[in-house]
Amino acid sequence: MTGGSGASWGSPVRPYSAGGKDAFIAKLNASGSLVWNTFLGASDNVVSFGKKKATVSKATATRLTVKIPADCKRGTVNVEVKVDGVKSNEVPFTAK
């Protein structure tokens, strides 16, 4: 089961980030009792704009909401996302 939560519950594999609403994944047994759960929160994600770290304010299973760093250069910059130490390919982004 998947969803979003504004608070921690269960004994999560990865803790709730305590900042906004985190996505979660949970496994239930045949009788509907919780087997395990984990959160996918903003604290475990790093987004960089041209090597400048952005503030991640919200994370779901499919979307990150970030604040572009004030000192980010304007124009085309490369954006990179890192989750649990795994980096994405850099993608060009136009900062205005």
Image (cartoon, helix red, strand yellow):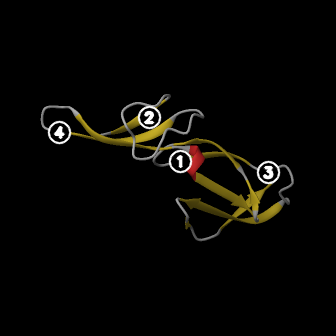
Q: Position of residue 3 (x, y in %)?
A: 39, 36
Residue occupying the point 53% across, 47% down: 63
| Label 4 neighbour load within 10 Å: few <14, some 14-19, many 20+ | few
Relative to 95, residue 21 above or below:
above
Give the number of the mark in front: 3 or 1: 3
Amino acid at the residue labelled 4 = Asn
- First along the sequence among labels 2 and 4: 2
Alpha carbon distance from label 4 to label 3: 44 Å
Q: Report which quarter residue 25 is drawn in.
A: top left
58 or 15: which is nearer to us?
15
Residue occupying the point 58% across, 32% down: 20
Say whether marks 4 and 3 touch (CB < 8 Å): no
Q: Which residue position is annotated with label 2?
A: 4
Alpha carbon distance from label 1 to label 2: 12 Å
Amino acid at the residue labelled 3 = Pro
Give the number of the mark in front: 1 or 2: 2
| Label 2 neighbour load within 10 Å: few <14, some 14-19, many 20+ | some
Q: Which residue position is annotated with label 3?
A: 69
Q: Position of residue 81 (x, y in %)?
A: 60, 60
Q: Which residue position is annotated with label 1?
A: 63
**Please, what secondary structure does the residue beneath circle 3 have?**
loop
